[in-house]
Amino acid sequence: MGFKSNSSDREAMSEINVTPLVDVMLVLLVVFIVTAPLLTQAVHVNLPKTEKTDPAPEAHLAALEIDAQGNITLNDKPQALATLGQQLLDMQKADAELTVQLQADEAVPYGKVAAAMAIVRKEGISKLAFITRE
């Protein structure tokens, strides 16, 4: 238990027992390793390739994503095409300088992308950016 056989009872123990500290740190490390993959929730979109351009300012952005199956998400929340216009209108009222970043998988039919673009334009949002990969 850390007692010395040749010391008196009044003498203070000068060694620190680090075993409990190591045990706690190992448990925290295991918890972090298990929970870290759960924190990354993203829509997997295979973007088309283009030339590099300057990024849009991050202050007034809304991310509109269309995956390969045609599912639409707005700021990581699933949306139906019918309700997309109302959501964009509410965001436009809250932020007049709203820029919509459109990320569409290259396997999505052009009609689905064109319909989403038409809804964005119909709601009066004139700033539309396309996200591609280099």
Image (cartoon, helix red, strand yellow):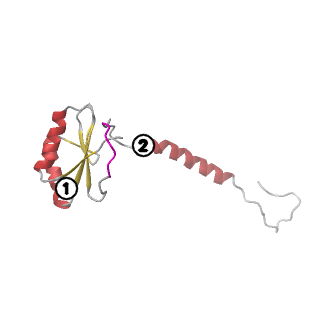
Total number of numbered discs in the rendering? 2
Residue sitting at the far left: 122
- Label for residue 73? none
Image location of residue 9, percent across then percent down:
83, 65
Q: Mark 1 or mark 2: which comes first in sequence? A: 2
Quadrant of the image occupied by residue 130: top left
The amino acid pointed to by label 1 is Met
Q: Which residues are magenta?
A: 48-54
| Depth order, front residue of 28/111 | 111
Picture coordinates of residue 50, whole percent (x, y): 31, 40
> 66 left or right of 23?
left
Q: Is residue 33 above or below residue 16?
A: above
Residue furthest to the right in view is 6
Image quarter hosting the C terminus: top left
On screen, 48 above or below 75? above
Residue 61 on image: x %, y %: 27, 54
Q: At which x and y percent is residue 54?
A: 32, 52
Q: Which mark, residue 91?
A: 1
Q: Residue furthest bottom?
A: 10
Whole-angstrom CA distance, mark 1 to mark 2, is 28 Å
Q: Secondary structure at mark 1?
A: helix
**In terms of depth relative to the viewer, which is nearer, 129 or 37?**
129
Residue in the picture at 15% in, 34% down: 111
Residue type indicated by callout 2: Leu
Left or right placement of residue 119 versus residue 43 in this view = left
Which quadrant is the N terminus positioned in?
bottom right
Q: Residue at x 32, y 42 (%)?
A: 51
Residue 117 in the magenta stretch? The answer is no
- The residue tagged 2 is 38
At x 17% / y 36%, what residue is drawn? 112
